Image: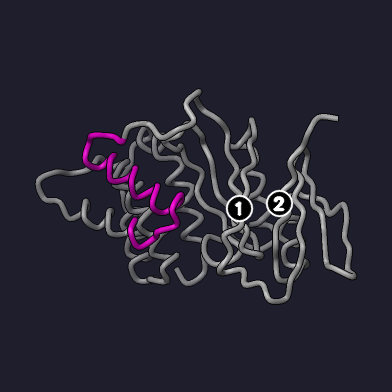
Amino acid sequence: MPEKTIPILPCRTLQPVLDFYTALGFEVTYRQRSPNPYAVVERDGIELQFFAMKQYEPTESFSTCYVLTDDVEGLYQAFRAGLKETYGRIPTRGLPRVGPLKDMSYGVRQFLMTDPGGNCVRVGQRTGREHRHGPAPEETFARALHFASLLADSKGDAAGAAKVIDRVLCLTDEKPTRVQLLQLLVLRADVAGRLGDDEASASALARAAALDLTGAERDLGRDALTRLADLRGSPRL
């Protein structure tokens, strides 16, 4: 048979992790309770394996893996639907959580989800031949969005992303397009939520929701609008 790589990821206890992946449409195909807790989940061509250890701290996890697909849109919508049915909302902060679907500068369209064990599963679809970062945009607001997105989602630096966005939104000699403003405000709300700043998150969400967009602008900003809806459905906002 051809070679296959299967990630084996840690967690503190198996059940919350298995419940999360079941909500995403995975099937638990194996479970061992002793001597060491261990489980396998599968969904179509995706297989993930987990082991439990009591001393493990999910909030401090750096465990991650990448799932390549040819239908990232379909998986994203299916996962969101399953989570909403199970949790009553799309979890966007804490554990578990699901990030926005977006086009990245290194030739993939992807989203990140983090399970109750703190494992970050990146799900993406290649959109071009280049698999390295392209040049950063020159235009002021596109450039700010580019670097803020990288800080927030690639480096995990929510505070750094917030600083980039706050700096560019304070400019008085240049103005973003309404789509750029939508994208910046939604990302600002997102990172504020990760930082526990509910006031800043609510303010950015209110400004984003109040934008009067044309049909063409809504189409261009559809990823941000989807994320806006998810963030507004989160608790405490």
- The three-letter code of the residue at mark 2 reads Leu
Give the magenta part as a residue range. Answer: 136-161
Q: Crowdedness of circle 2 by 10 Å Cα count: few (<14), some, many (20+)?
A: many
Residue 188 percent location from the top left of the image: 35, 57
Residue drawn at 31 percent across, 57 percent down: 207
Of the residues shown, which amino acid type is indicated by label 1? Thr
Which residue is disc 2 drawn over? 24
Seen as rendered, the residue at the extreme left is: 173
Near-viewer residue (222 or 124): 124
| Residue tagged 1 | 64
Give the side of residue 8 with respect to residue 199, left or right: right
Q: x, y percentage for residue 228?
A: 44, 53
Q: How is the image coloured?
A: one colour
The residue drawn where x is 73% and y is 54% is: 8
Labels 2 and 1: the sequence-earlier one: 2
Which quadrant of the figure contains the C terminus?
bottom left
Q: Residue at x 68, y 76 (%)?
A: 55
